[in-house]
Amino acid sequence: MTAPVLEVDALSIRAGDRVLVDDLSFSVRPGERVGLIGESGSGKSLTTLAILGLLPEQLTASGRIHLGGVDAITAPERDLVRVRGRIAAPVFQEPATALDPLMRVGRQVALPLARHRRLRGAALRSEVARLFADVALTDPRIPRAFPHELSGGQRQRVALAIALAADPRVLLADEPTTALDVSVQAEVLALIDRLARSRDMAVVFVSHDLAVVSRIADRGLVLRAGAVVEEGPVDALLRRPRAAYTADLVAAARRFENAARPGRTA
């Protein structure tokens, strides 16, 4: 069996005496998609930050996170810099804040290529163009644009291109479609799915919405107050939830979908 590209073992995150993530364990193998599902405050985003070694200083973590030969909890910053982007790369919820507002987006895509893959000159320009094409940004004016000159969907595609630049083994997608309208959301989800398949890339997809996770993930972990209440194949979680909390999430997603259908009124 293929070895996991990411292993989270007994992860706990605390703010003083308050437990924010409690004894969380999971692993992800190449090409596998795992969803972290739960409401705001359930510990999903904190888990992705811990994987990248980016927890705020006031929080403390224990357990083990095996990523690219290092433990993200105990490794020094010089080792974490080596694995960020190259082994695990994030796509955050709001690209308007994740992107540098003062830098043209083409240069932002070029930076990880220069850092991790040591590309320069014509080779760098060629790879930047290929990444923009991969995320379906074919207008030649876009690389010269600043983030505020692009739509929300275009900005999220740029953020995805940045994440893919160093050919990571794991994509950490933290609510990447929440700020987008429904049609653009579907396009971005389809894009992540296609790119993950073509690259045999693992995906950890964070969302409060089981219906959204079902479009990307094979397996899901449902978190409440930092602890796993249920896990298993996403299809089973949707069709036969065992935990009352999971059933509530499914029911809420279905009510939202019904309300959003054309011709329906609240």
Image: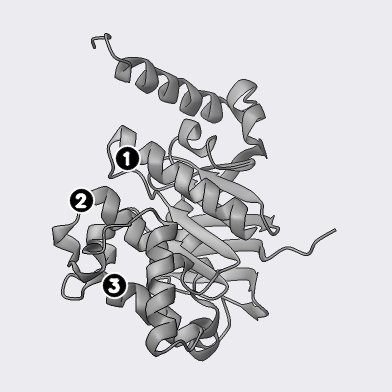
Callout 3: 10 Å neighbours few (<14), some, many (20+)? many
The number of numbered discs placed on residues in the rendered structure image is 3
Q: Which residue is at a point 60% across and 62% down the rendered structure image?
A: 11
Q: Position of residue 200 (x, y in %)?
A: 65, 58
Mark-to-mark CA distance, 2 and 1: 10 Å
Residue at the disc numbered 1: 184
> Image quadrant for the C terminus?
top left
- Identify the mark at residue 151; answer none if there is no mark: 2
Residue type pointed to by label 2: Ser
Q: Secondary structure at mark 3?
A: helix
Q: Are marks 2 and 1 in contact (CB under 8 Å)?
A: yes
Asked if residue 15 shows in the view, the reply is no
Image quarter of residue 109:
bottom left
Residues at discs 3 and 1 in contact (Cβ within 8 Å): no
Marked residue nearer the N-terminal end (2 or 1) = 2
The quadrant of the picture occupied by the N terminus is: bottom right
Q: Position of residue 64 (x, y in %)?
A: 65, 70
